[in-house]
Amino acid sequence: MIRVLASRWQGSVLVCGKCSKKLDGGFGEKGRTSLVKLLRQALGVKKGRKADRGVVEVKCLGVCPKNAVVMVDGARPDRWMLVPAGADVDEVVATLTEHENLPSPSPPPASLPLP
């Protein structure tokens, strides 16, 4: 039997852990803080399911950019963001919160049926 737990999350952000590990932090004043930690601080996120929003570090998203971290906003899974090392956290948070104003990328062309 599958159990369902209630959560207060209004959204979630997935951050690639492999990219973060390659940068060895890469963010913050001294460049030693991980993007996950800075996002949690900037968004005021608490730990666990009782938080308003979740910031989750996942294993690998498979994009693997150089000198950047891949991030996916759960509210806009069609837009994957590449956050360069040393990027301003306020800019990253602004990108997450302005998702209503940005158009979605065009969908891939539909395949034609075979005759």
Image (cartoon, rainbow, N blue to C red):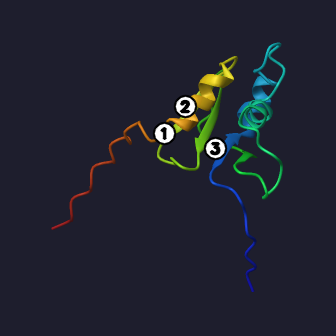
Q: At 84% from the left edge and 20% from the top edge, which residue is drawn?
A: 32
Q: Which residue is labeled 1 in the image?
A: 99
Q: In this view, does 39 lie above or below 110?
A: above
Whether the residues at callouts 2 and 1 have beta carbons within 8 Å, the answer is yes
Q: Nearer the viewer, mark 1 or mark 3?
A: 1
Q: At 68% from the left edge and 24% from the top edge, which residue is drawn?
A: 89
Query: Hey, which residue is sitting farthest bottom in the picture?
Result: 1
Labels 3 and 2: the sequence-earlier one: 3
Viewer-closest of 108 and 31: 31
Q: Crowdedness of circle 3 by 10 Å Cα count: few (<14), some, many (20+)?
A: some
- The amino acid at mark 3 is Leu
Quadrant of the image occupied by residue 21: top right
Question: Residue 101: x percent and y percent?
Answer: 41, 37
Q: Which residue is labeled 3 in the image?
A: 61
Viewer-closest of 52 and 30: 52
Residue 95, numbered circle: 2
Question: Residue 4: x percent and y percent?
Answer: 73, 75
Q: Which of marks 3 and 2 is in front?
A: 2
- Please state if 78 lies on the left or on the right of 93 as rendered: left
